[in-house]
Image (cartoon, rainbow, N blue to C red):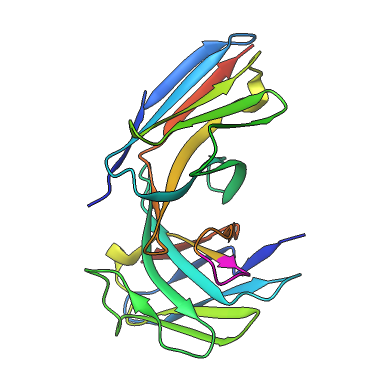
Amino acid sequence: GAVVSQHPSWVICKSGTSVKIECRSLDFQATTMFWYRQFPKQSLMLMATSNEGSKATYEQGVEKDKFLINHASLTLSTLTVTSAHPEDSSFYICSARSGTGGADEQYFGPGTRLTVT
Amino acid sequence: KQEVTQIPAALSVPEGENLVLNCSFTDSAIYNLQWFRQDPGKGLTSLLLIQSSQREQTSGRLNASLDKSSGRSTLYIAASQPGDSATYLCAVLLNTDKLIFGTGTRLQVFP
């Protein structure tokens, strides 16, 4: 149980275009989903937290107009990178949590590799 | 600001050795601490989760300990195997609902 999927697993896009990444909880309802970014040989950095039906909370330094997050249902959250640039190339990982308590475990997706040319 | 540091950054050992990976965090006000494994280009696999009230957790050849007061956790891997080669990440869950990741330890176990 507790499987999280991401789509696509990798994507190449041209500079200036927008890319949407989906994160789905397959066998549980996720009240909260998290989006992380990981640069090569670095650790994961939290970008934003989203609760179903409400606006996402972005971490300091993350542009909310550039990284649009939508959590429209209890099983799906999307991250749209708008007007992508080469510096946005990274590994994006989502996680999902079923409970509302902070101590509930997060389950991670397999990640999406974004390359902007 | 919570900072999570892992030592060593990289480790290369022969098969069969027992290993200790270290994780330290600056603020002891955490909900729990979790150890993950990440293979190159892949997502995270959760290995062990230790609640703040616990001292250790064990799963197979893995044992993780937590000393919250000193801000330290160790991951012990017994009888290492080439299949254990990966990057190991520790992460602490803050009471603000955020998971803060460490810098990672890249492990290579050679036959």
Give the left or right position of residue A103, taking residue B82 as reference. Answer: left
B81 shown above or below A36: above
Q: Position of residue B100 (x, y in %)?
A: 38, 52
Quarter holding the C terminus of chain B? Answer: top right
For the point 51% across and 67% down, the residue is A11
Q: Which residues are magenta?
A: A96-101
Give the number of callouts. Answer: 0
Q: Nearer the viewer, residue A83 or B99?
A: B99
Q: Nearer the viewer, residue A82 or B78?
A: B78
Q: Is residue A97 magenta?
A: yes
Q: Is residue A30 magenta?
A: no
The residue positioned farthest toward the front in the image shown: B53
For the point 53% across and 16% down, the residue is B19
Among the 4 quarters of the image, the one containing residue A46: bottom left
Q: Position of residue B74 (x, y in %)?
A: 47, 26
For the point 59% across and 69% down, the residue is A8
Q: Position of residue A108 (x, y in %)?
A: 58, 58
Predominant secondary structure, magenta span: loop
Q: Nearer the viewer, residue A16 or B6?
A: B6
Q: Position of residue A106 (x, y in %)?
A: 57, 59
Among the 4 quarters of the image, the one containing residue B27: top left
Q: Nearer the viewer, residue A40 or A62?
A: A62
For the point 34% across and 34% down, the residue is B71
Give the left or right position of residue A35, taking residue A109 as reference. Answer: left
